[in-house]
Each structure stands twice: as structure tokens, then as C-alpha cells.
Image (cartoon, grey):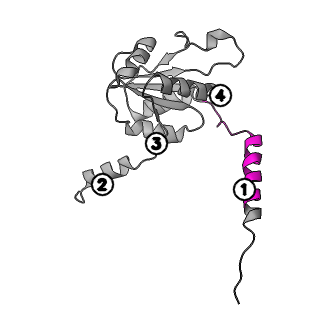
């Protein structure tokens, strides 16, 4: 790799952090849906024709982290074709499935096609960002305080065991 602008920009873009989850079959998609329901987050489903994650999606996944869950579903995997047919997608598309209300009945387990919002604009950064900000939660979902206390108690217990330090004169 030479030190030219194109090579350096592709290197930097490859190193961008990404919180886009890849779906490689119905099992992964079910795990993704349960994660979204657990935290009450809307799902952004990126249906693509190839396995490469777009740089725009990498940026948006870090920008809207903990406010929306983003999944990439490539058409190249045979297992994902049923998911494409389930949502009625052909080619590249971006869909938003709003969060389901827990305890709302059995209807919330299946995706409701009337609640699903499709991105219909031109794929540029400004329009994608405004679409994400419109459908993402306004505030980040934080972990519950009980989980933090459990982690802190474990850390204190481990540090209590490690307090024995040898000192040499």
C-alpha cells in the first residue's frame, strides 16, 4: 500500500468502529429481535446485496448507539432470503421497525407491516442522518442500576483478594 490519499482514506474507513450487527440466518435475526425488545429499541434493518457494511452505516451506528439497533441483512446468504420475503424487500432497502410494547399481546411478536417505515429518499449522508434522528429514541437506553451494582460488587470482591502485596526492603 502506497502513501496516497485514496489508500490512506480506505485504510481509515476500514478502521472505523461499527456497531452494525450482521444477520446470518433466522437464528441471528431472532436474537436481534429479542435484544431490541429487551431494551425497547427500534430496529433499523439494512437489506443489502453484498456483505460489505457501508461507511455511512458505520458512522450512523456509532452516532445513534443505544438509541437504535442496526442490522445488516445481506442477500448473499441463502438463509436470509426468507427475511427478505417476510418484509417484501427486493435489492437494497432500509426499514425501520418501531419498538414493540411489552405485554401488548401476541400481535407484537410478529412484525406489523403497517408500522414499518421505509426510507425512500436518495442515499446520501444528510438524508440518512435526518431519517435516523427522526426514528431513533431521543435519549440513550442505559443499563439498569442493579446490573452496575452486581459488577461493582464483583470488582470489590476481586480487589479484596488481591490486596496482599509483597514488599521488599
Q: Which residue is mark 3?
A: 18
Q: Which residue is mark 4?
A: 38
Q: Nearer the viewer, mark 4 or mark 3?
A: 4
Q: Give the image quarter of residue 55.
A: top left
- Whether residue 47 is in magenta: the answer is no
Residues marked 4 and 3 touching at CB (< 8 Å): no
Quadrant occupied by the N terminus:
bottom left
Which secondary structure, mark 3? loop
Quadrant occupied by the C terminus:
bottom right
Q: Chief secondary structure of the magenta span?
A: helix
Numbered range of the magenta stretch: 137-158
Q: Which residue is mark 2?
A: 8
Q: Residue at x 35, y 25 (%)?
A: 77
Q: Cα distance, mark 2 to mark 3? A: 19 Å
User: Nearer the N terminus, badge 4 or badge 1?
Assistant: 4
Q: Residue at x 51, y 42 (%)?
A: 62
User: Nearer the N terminus, badge 2 or badge 3?
Assistant: 2
Q: Which residue is mark 1?
A: 155
Q: For this rendering, which residue is in front, 12 or 144?
A: 144
Residues marked 2 and 4 touching at CB (< 8 Å): no
Classed neighbour count for the residue bearing mark 1: other residues with Cα under 10 Å, few (<14), some (14–19), many (≥20): few
User: Nearer the N terminus, badge 3 or badge 1?
Assistant: 3
Q: Give the image quarter of residue 82.
A: top left
Amino acid at each position: 500500500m502506497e502513501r496516497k490519499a485514496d489508500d490512506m482514506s480506505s485504510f481509515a474507513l476500514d478502521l472505523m468502529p461499527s456497531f452494525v450487527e450482521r444477520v446470518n440466518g433466522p437464528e441471528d435475526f431472532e436474537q436481534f429481535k429479542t435484544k431490541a425488545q429487551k431494551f425497547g429499541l427500534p430496529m433499523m434493518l439494512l437489506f443489502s446485496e453484498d456483505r460489505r457494511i457501508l461507511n455511512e452505516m458505520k458512522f450512523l451506528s456509532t452516532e445513534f448507539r443505544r438509541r437504535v439497533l442496526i442490522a445488516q441483512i445481506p442477500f448473499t446468504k441463502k438463509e436470509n432470503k426468507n427475511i427478505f420475503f417476510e418484509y417484501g424487500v427486493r435489492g437494497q432497502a432500509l426499514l425501520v421497525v418501531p419498538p414493540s410494547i411489552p405485554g401488548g399481546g401476541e400481535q407484537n411478536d410478529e412484525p406489523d407491516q403497517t408500522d414499518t417505515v421505509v426510507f425512500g429518499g436518495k442515499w446520501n449522508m444528510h438524508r440518512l442522518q435526518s431519517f435516523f434522528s427522526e426514528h431513533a429514541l431521543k435519549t440513550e437506553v442505559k443499563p439498569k442500576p442493579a446490573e452496575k451494582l452486581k459488577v461493582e460488587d464483583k470488582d470489590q470482591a476481586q480487589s479484596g483478594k488481591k490486596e496482599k502485596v509483597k514488599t521488599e526492603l
